[in-house]
Amino acid sequence: MSCSSASIDDYANTTPKLDLAEFFDGKLTAAGIVQDFSGKVTRKFTVTMEAHWSDTPQGKQGVINEWFVYDDGEKQTRVWTIIDQGDGSYLGTANDILGIAQGESKGSALRWRYDMLLAVDDSEYEVHFDDWMFLVDQNTIINKSDIIKFGITVAEVTLVISKQAD
């Protein structure tokens, strides 16, 4: 595992084109894994999501509610608020995100970068996420995140996000 050297520009001409507001609208589900630095799967989880978008003076704003259930029984909730800046870039905040997440979309890909307070056992660690989403088809995104501490990838998260019929 290493820091990503791919550029969002590498995906400019890929299809299908990812429209965040179109994909993240309504009900979604996800299933994923967390791998440590050696590639060993350390956790499995599922996510239930509900998302909606509205027009605001700052631009199109999305709210994505996420409910996580981990294989050890832990439950977690995250609420993202995302502003579409209209030029393929996004700004996002969430309850456990430090500062503002920066996102950029081209073609079928979206790259998020943000810092998070990550709870592990009885401690919290400030880590950086390099988060890539790839639209496979109108109903499926594959999401891969590198979790980075002191410039070193310490874990990876992979999940498949699926739109659900309303």
Image (spheres, rainbow, N blue to C red):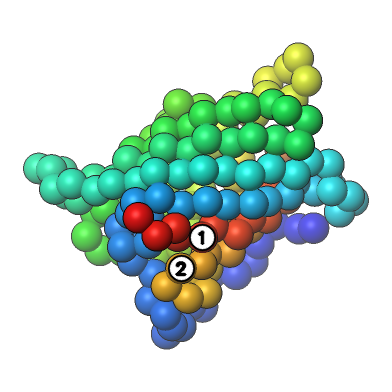
On screen, residue 75 above or below 92: above
The residue lying furthest to the left in this view is 57
The residue lying toward the viewer, choosing from 19 and 72, is 72
Q: Which quadrant: the N terminus?
A: bottom right
Dividing the image into 4 quarters, which one contains the C terminus? bottom left
In the image, is residue 13 above or below residue 24? Answer: below
Q: CA distance from mark 2 to mark 1?
A: 6 Å
* Left/right of residue 149 with respect to residue 66 in the rendered view: right
Q: Quadrant of residue 104?
A: bottom left
**Residue at label 1?**
162
Residue 143 versus residue 140 in the image, above or below:
above
Give the farthest residue toward the front.
Answer: 166
63 or 38: which is nearer to us?
A: 63
Label 1 SS: strand
Residue 126 circle label: none
Q: Residue drawn at (38%, 76%), measured in percent from left and top? A: 17
Q: Are marks 2 and 1 in contact (CB under 8 Å)?
A: yes
Q: Amino acid at mark 2?
A: Asn
Label 2 residue SS: loop
User: Can residue 107 be seen here?
Assistant: no
Left or right for 12, reference 63: right
Q: Is residue 128 left or right of residue 106?
A: right
Callout 1 amino acid? Ser
Few, some or many residues within 10 Å of mark 1 (<14, 14–19, 20+): many
Image location of residue 146, percent across then percent down = 67, 51
Query: Residue at (33%, 66%) from the top-left corner?
Result: 19
For the point 46% across and 44% down, the residue is 49
Q: Which residue is mark 2?
A: 139
Note whether residue 57 is visible. yes
Identify the image quadrant of residue 23.
bottom left
In the picture provided, is 59 more to the left or to the right than 144? left
